Image (spheres, helix red, strand yellow):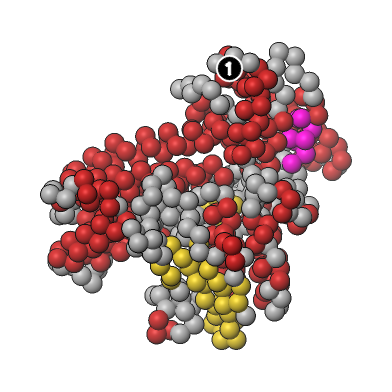
Amino acid sequence: TSLCPPSRDRIRPSPSPRSSSTSDPQNNWFFLIPQSPDLSVCEADGRKVLRSSIREFLCSEAMFHLGIPTTRAGACVTSQSTVVRDVFYDGNPKYEKCTVVLRIASTFLRFGSFEIFKSADEHTGREGPSVGRNDIRVQMLDYVIGTFYPEIQAAHADNSVQRNAAFFREVTRRTARMVAEWQCVGFCHGVLNTDNMSIVGLTIDYGGEQGGCDPDHVCNASDNAGRYAYSKQPEVCKWNLQKLVEALEPELPRELGEAILAEEFDAEFRRHYLQKMRRKLGLVRAELEDDGVLVAKLLETMHLTGADFTNTFHLLSSFPVGPEPQGMPEFLDALTAQCASLEELKLAFRPQMDPRWVPRPPFLGMGFQKERTIQNRAWGICWKDELGCDSRARLEKDREGAGDSDTWQAERLRVMRASNPKYVLRNYIAQNAIEAAENGDFSEASGRLPLLRPWDPGAHTDACSITSIPGQDPRQTTSSK
C-alpha cells in the first residue's frame, strides 16, 4: 500500500533558507529510502515501521506548507513484513509493519557525514571509519561547497581556508534561522544529534507540534533526560555546529571555526526569532530592544495557563487596540477558553515527589464547576495583566510610526494572519491516521494531505479545527522511531 502527495506538490522544493543554492546548478533533487525493509540496504538503526513513517510523511509535508525549510515526502509504502519494536521503550514490544518513506531533498548530507574522520575518542576509544583520510574530507568539502554553495566557491576559489570559513559561516546562519523557525511555531524536532542536522539547513527529523507552550516538552519517548527539549533546541543546534567545526579540522582551523560560531549563531538566531515573533504579535513598524522581554513574558504566561501555542497566537490578531478598545472581555473569554483544564494542569504539573509533601493550590480541592469558574477568573486576570500596560504601550509605540491608524491596523492584521496559522498537524490527527493505517485504512492519512495548508481555510474541515479534543493533554504526546 502506498501514499503520495497530490500531484501538484510532488517534486516541489522546500523554501530555500534565504538562498537559491539549496539545490545544485542543474536543479537536481536526491531521493532517499531510509530504513528499507530489505536489511541489505537499510540504515544502521534498522527497519522503519508504519507508525513512524506515517508521522514523518505527514509532518514533513506540514512543515513545508508552514514555509519552514525541510526535506519532503514523495511516497510512503508499506508491506506485510513485520519487525519487533518497543514503542515507548517500556518493556512492551510488539510486531509492526515494515514501511519505506521516499524522501526528497537537494542533499541528505548531514553534519555527521563529516564525522567519519573523527579521531579516537578519549573515553571510548572509538574512531571514525575514515580517520586520517584528509584527502576524502577535501573531496567532500569541494563537492558540498561547489554543488550547494556555488557563490561561495566562486568568491573564494583561490583560498580554501577562506572558502571553508565562508561555508561554515553560512551553515551556521542557516541552522540558526531554521531552529528559530521551529521555536516560532512550537515545533519539536525529535532526536537532534549531528546525524539529523542537514548541511544545507533543512529539517530532517519530525517530532511534531507540542500543542501547549512547555519549555521542557520532549517529543521522543527515548529522551528521558530531556536533552532535546523544546527550549534546548537552539543550544543543541549550536553544540552540533561545534562538533562540525571539530570534524572539518584541519581544512577549517578550529580557532577560526569557533570564532565564527561565537560571532554568528546567537546573533542570527535572536535576530530571526524576534523578527518572526514581532510579526506574530503584529509589531510591524518599530523594532525595540525590549521586544525579547515582551515575548518571554507572553510565553511564560502561556506555559502557566496551559495555553495552546497555535490557538493563542491566532487569537491575538483579535486583540483590541486603540485608546478606548472595545471587546476586551469577549477577547479574554476566548483566550481563557483554550487554556488547559484543571485536570490537564494537574497532570502536566504533577509532583515528582510524594504528594503529601507538596502544597496544593487551594482551589484544586473544590468541586469541578467551582474550580473551573475560579480558574477562568484566575486565567482572565493573568492574561489581562500580561496583555495590559506593557503590551498596549508597545502597540502604541508601533502605531506612532504609522501616519494613518486605519492603515496600520490593516497592515497589522494582514501580517499577523500571514504569520499565525489557524491549522496545524495536531498530534491526535496524526495518531488517528496512524491507527487507521495500522488497521488497513490509508484514506485517513491520504485525506489529511490537503489539510496541511495552514493558510487556506477553504481546504479544511472540522477535522483540523483549532479546538482541542476534550480531555486530551497536548503536553503528554510523544513519538518513537
Q: How many marks?
A: 1
Residue 59: in magenta span: no
The residue pinned by badge 1 equals 402
In this view, the residue in front, 109 or 383, is: 109
Magenta part mainly helix, strand or loop? helix
Left or right position of 252 against 40: left
The residue positioned 48% from the left and 51% from the top of the image is: 15
Residue 313: image quadrant is top right
Task: Return the residue nearer the eye: 279 or 220.
Answer: 279
Against 418, is 425 above or below? below
Q: Is residue 465 visible?
A: yes
Percent across and percent down for residue 168 are 27, 48
Residue 116 shown left or right of residue 480 in the figure: left
Vertical placement of residue 453 versus 34, above or below:
above
Q: Nearer the viewer, residue 457 or 209?
A: 457
Q: Position of residue 295 (x, y in %)?
A: 55, 31
Residue 360 appears in view = no
Furthest toward the left, the residue is 158
Q: Which x, y percent locates residue 339? A: 72, 40
| Label 1 secondary element | loop
- Picture quadrant of residue 265: top left
> Magenta stretch?
331-338
On the image, the x and y values in percent for residue 280 come to: 59, 35
Q: Is residue 240 left or right of residue 73?
A: left
Query: Which of 312 and 148 lies nearest the eye of the viewer?
Result: 148
287 is higher (above) or lower (below) than 129 = above
**Toward which corner of the image does residue 425 lie, by quadrant?**
bottom right
In the rendered image, residue 336 lying in the magenta stretch gets the answer yes
Residue drawn at x 64%, y 49% as measured from the top left: 454
Q: Residue visible at 60% across and 77% down?
A: 2
Q: Quick one: quadrant of the N terminus?
A: bottom right
